[in-house]
Image (cartoon, helix red, strand yellow):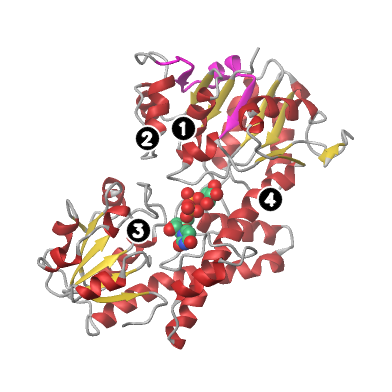
Amino acid sequence: MSPKITVIGLGYLGATHAAAMAELGFEVLGLDIVPEKTQALARGETPIYEPGLEDLLRRHVAGLPGSSGRLSFTTSFAEIGEFGDVHFICVNTPQKPGEYACDMSYVDSAVDALAPHLTRPALVVGKSTVPVGSAARLARRVAELAPVGEAAELAWNPEFLREGFAVEDTLRPDRIVAGVHGAHGAHGGTGTGAGTGTGERAEALLREIYARPLAEGTPFILTDLPTAELVKTAANAFLSTKISFINAMAEVCETAGGDVVKLAEALGHDDRIGRKFLRAGIGFGGGCLPKDIRAFMARAGELGAAEALSFLREIDAINMRRRVFMVELTRETLGGSLLGKRIAVLGAAFKPDSDDVRDSPALNIAGQLHLQGAEVTVYDPKAMDNARRIFPTLRYAADVVDAAQGAHAVLHLTEWREFREIDPAALAEVVSERHVLDGRNTLDPALWRKANWTYRALGRPTA
Ligand code: UDX
């Protein structure tokens, strides 16, 4: 009999994971403490914009016409305890307000609510991004609270999905990392230290759950608990570093007169460097990279290893500096003052193919311009509702042309495909002044200049 799966927390990660597990053939029960979320999902509606997710829900949510019926939802921990053999924890770990450290209260509450219902052998699998050391602590907590005691084990299986590709990344991950107790390359099973069991049953269950991607050749990396937690934070720290590295090169290009786009292209041909995550612009945002590098620094500090990660402070600083520079560049382009200037901001999401505005560089820049006296009108293909909710004082337009009416400058801040297809000659008809500032380096400078726009970008020559 296949293991029955539950997924706790139905945000980006959990909703996608639950649907993907049903797609892989398992019976799945998803839990969220917010009833509106489970009710919407039970109707086949996604809480978020994520390509492909709604299709998966339609295919599997119980009660929908023609569905497999393998996916259901609840708000009851008693129900998932009764139902599941494997429980995935997918709740979020946001940055604590005013601090670098992450807020573990959702993970802690999920474990405390679930464990008392574990009356038969079960595996709890953490997927959330957590400070290293959390898994060992949670493993002890599970065994302490579960009526079944040490037969309730805990493993850590970090998730590397990217928003916009969440379904694809979950069904076809590039690696599966399984952190289990006692694994140091092979199972030691010494029983010392944190947690319970030897990890062999945990490994076997995870191999069974991921049988399809494993059969397709996805590497399975077995680690101990702290290494599994670290893989995730280290990966995000590395990606952030790559982006801030190229943005630092953009700063140098700005003073030396170089072109960072050409520089990145030339660097990327070196296989050891690679082309990906070398796109210079207004930097990284979203619900993961910024808060993960800060939480990583905070945790290293607690462990007495602050120095090892002090470089991440600089990575964060470079990233935040790019947003300020974009505002400065706009001011300079508009003759030294933003007061009363009409600015069209194209993009609000932190990246294209997402409606997520958490720590969005685009929205942050729009806000800074607004606070400095500009009249800012924002347009985004998908993130308007979310943007409006967190920044109600900005103006919002129905499309690109509407946003650009009478504008003194057009700022391109999230690289949606739709914006690459803008006809600069047609847009010139509605603006007051032809200034375009490309915060993502994905518009074609020649095309805009041909239509008599001044095109400015980060890390690139002016003309
Ligand atoms: C990231 C990681 O990629 C993923 O593995 C992890 O599980 C969660 O965090 P995500 O936040 O969805 O995923 O977005 P990602 O595609 O990594 O982009 C993050 C930010 O970096 C975006 O704001 C994007 O615009 C920016 N970025 C990315 C750049 O500025 N330049 C680049 O070259 C790449």
As measured in the structure, the alpha-carbon distance from the residue carrying label 1 to the one carrying label 2 is 8 Å
Q: Which residue is mark 3?
A: 415
Secondary structure category for the residue under label 3: loop
Q: What segment is highlighted magenta in the picture? A: 67-89
Q: Is residue 317 visible?
A: no
Q: Is residue 127 left or right of residue 304?
A: left
CB of mark 1 within 8 Å of CB of mark 2? Answer: yes
Residue occupying the far bottom of the picture: 256
Q: Is residue 346 left or right of residue 188?
A: left
Q: Which residue is mark 1?
A: 15
In the picture shown, does residue 311 fall above or below 101?
Answer: below
What label sits on residue 47 in the rendered view?
Answer: 2
Q: Considering only order in the chain, which callout, 4 or 2, is on the residue closer to the N terminus?
A: 2
> Residue 54's quadrant in the figure?
top left
What label sits on residue 213 in the rendered view?
Answer: none
Q: Amino acid at mark 1?
A: Ala
x, y (%) of residue 369?
27, 70
Q: Is residue 218 left or right of residue 74?
A: right
Q: Which residue is mark 4?
A: 230
CB of mark 4 within 8 Å of CB of mark 1? Answer: no
Whether disc 3's CB lies below 8 Å from ligand 1 is answered yes
Q: Considering only order in the chain, which callout, 1 or 4, is on the residue closer to the N terminus?
A: 1
Q: Considering only order in the chain, which callout, 3 or 2, is on the residue closer to the N terminus?
A: 2
Whether disc 1's CB lies below 8 Å from ligand 1 is answered no
Q: Amino acid at mark 2?
A: Pro
Q: Is residue 319 visible?
A: yes
Badge nearest the viewer, 3 or 4: 3
CB of mark 2 within 8 Å of CB of mark 3? Answer: no
As measured in the structure, the alpha-carbon distance from the residue carrying label 2 to the one carrying label 3 is 23 Å
x, y (%) of residue 403?
17, 59
Q: Considering only order in the chain, which callout, 3 or 1, is on the residue closer to the N terminus?
A: 1
